[in-house]
Amino acid sequence: AAADTPGKYTKKEIVMEEFRFLKPRKMKHPTTGIDLEYLDKSNAVCIALFNEEKDKILLVEQYRPGNKGLMLEVPAGLIDSGEDPKTAVLREMREETGYSEEDIADFRGLDEGLYASPGYTTEKLYFFSARLKDNNIKPKELNLDHGEDLENEWVDVKDILKKSGDLKTILAVSLFKD
């Protein structure tokens, strides 16, 4: 429809090459030959950071475009080029929560990353967990990336399904709560 027609508009096409983190790709299905579309995306990390008793988890509240609103989720972020998952998750934890490696105990993770959604993305998510050595440890100042705007909130583990609709958060709590 013409842009000058009342009540009509022209849809501006998004140029995917302009995207910073998402790269559209196509491939042929190996047996059917149909075109498959997917996003080539960097791998990521997340951490379930529990309090000393492991009855609370520290979640990050931030705006997310997928649900067009605020979401409570475990601290997470992309793995930088040349960075290993352990280094990346400790960096993200420090940036988004103010807690450092010296503040935590029982640090562990899954041996391999899990595909976030293999039907449309190459991204693997590496899951980690830790607990504070002592609940009295005070977090340092956050070191947020440009454009990040987030708040931290301690949430009772038993309330996770009421507080978060984020799949990685629910899975991280389920994997590491015991």
Image: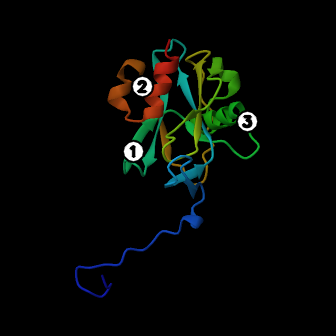
Question: Tag 3, which secondary structure?
Answer: loop
157 lies above or below 8: above
How far apart marks 2 and 1 lie (CA) works out to 15 Å
Amino acid type, residue under disc 1 in the picture = Leu
Question: Tag 1, which secondary structure?
Answer: strand
Which dot marks residue 106?
Answer: none
Which residue, given by chain and number where applicable, does mark 1 sit on? 70
Toward the right, the furthest residue is: 82
Which residue, given by chain and number where applicable, does mark 3 sit on? 84
- Figure quadrant of residue 11: bottom left
44 lies above or below 6: above
Badge 3, how many Cα within 10 Å: few under 14, some, many 20+?
Answer: few
Q: Position of residue 20 (x, y in %)?
A: 60, 59
Seen from the viewer's position, the closer of residues 63 and 126 is 126
Which residue is at a point 31% across and 85% down the rendered structure image?
2
- Figure quadrant of residue 131: top right
Seen from the viewer's position, the closer of residues 149 and 117 is 117
Which residue, given by chain and number where applicable, does mark 2 sit on? 155
Residue 58 visible in the shown view: yes
Q: Position of residue 104 (x, y in %)?
A: 64, 20
Seen from the viewer's position, the closer of residues 72 and 36 is 36
Mark closest to the chain's N terminus, 2 or 1: 1
